[in-house]
Image (cartoon, rainbow, N blue to C red):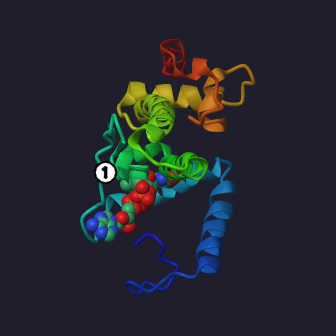
Amino acid sequence: MCLDELPAKRFEPIPRAALLSAAHRRKARTSTRGEGWRAGYARARRPCLAGGTALGPCATFSGEDTWAEVPFVEGVVLIGDAAGYSNPLIGQGLSLALRDARVLSEILVSTERWSPESFLPYAEERRKRVQRVRFTAALMAELYGSFGPQRTARRRHFLRRLPEPEFRGRTLLTSGCGPRSPAWAYTEDFRKEVLK
Ligand SMILES: Cc1cc2nc3c(=O)[nH]c(=O)nc-3n(C[C@H](O)[C@H](O)[C@H](O)COP(=O)(O)OP(=O)(O)OC[C@H]3O[C@@H](n4cnc5c(N)ncnc54)[C@H](O)[C@@H]3O)c2cc1C
């Protein structure tokens, strides 16, 4: 629809090289007008997007949090999304699943007799970990996934402050919600600072 300079056959894959050169041409074209290429790109695409026709239903995700308080019973241990997932907006699902596999495998190889009690450390570690993930997911959803002029201004304000070394909100993008990020990144004070 928008890539009008490219072959328009439906379902035909567009070669990556062609995509990159089309993007480059647009970038060059817009930047010669003395505006940032992002702004130029958005302006040039606007009529195209507004006049476009959706080819099918848009995929959606609901963004809820879900988790099992106790992710095991006799004979079964849940990991990954089966144990609980959060808003995919923050893109942490695979890390969580891989860490589950690591923590659990360490327990399995270090224990001769497996019983539900063996998995209590896993459950406890996961509980704390996903509490942090839920906090960050809710904060990021509020920051990036809410609309209206005030929210847009708030988002812009956040992005403008990112280069400031003393701005603690940078933590959201540097250490995300990993186990090594500082405890203050999960406090109400931090939330207010980011959403200022
Ligand atoms: C829109 C969206 C965007 C996301 N973006 C990111 C991202 O950028 N980064 C990131 O890290 N994570 C992201 N995630 C999350 C990530 O995809 C999941 O957290 C991750 O895939 C979980 O892995 P899993 O192995 O636990 O579950 P899954 O990947 O769901 O694997 C479960 C598998 O089991 C199969 N299965 C189900 N029932 C049965 C059955 N009865 N018999 C046999 N097989 C069965 C399913 O078909 C599936 O293949 C995103 C999720 C969504 C929804």
Report the quarter where the N terminus lies: bottom left
Q: Is residue 112 left or right of residue 31?
A: left
The extreme front residue here reads 113
| Label 1 crowd (10 A; few <14 / some 14-19 / many >=20) | few
Q: Identify the residue at image location x=49%, y=51%.
A: 97
64 or 104, which is in the foreground? Answer: 104
The amino acid type of the residue labelled 1 equals: Phe
Q: Is residue 7 left or right of residue 173?
A: left
Position in image of residue 141 (x %, y %): 41, 35
184 or 179, which is in the foreground? Answer: 179
Above or below: residue 68 compared with residue 25: above
Q: Is residue 15 left or right of residue 54?
A: right
Number of marks in the image?
Answer: 1
Q: Is mark 1 within 8 Å of ligand 1?
A: yes
Instruction: Provide the secondary structure element on which disc 1 rests.
Output: loop
Above or below: residue 154 compared with residue 177: above
Position in image of residue 168 (x %, y %): 65, 22
| The quarter of the picture showing ligand 1 | bottom left
Residue 86 appears anywhere in the view: no
Residue 106 appears anywhere in the view: yes
Residue that carries the numbered disc 1 in the rendered image:
61
189 or 40, which is in the foreground? Answer: 189
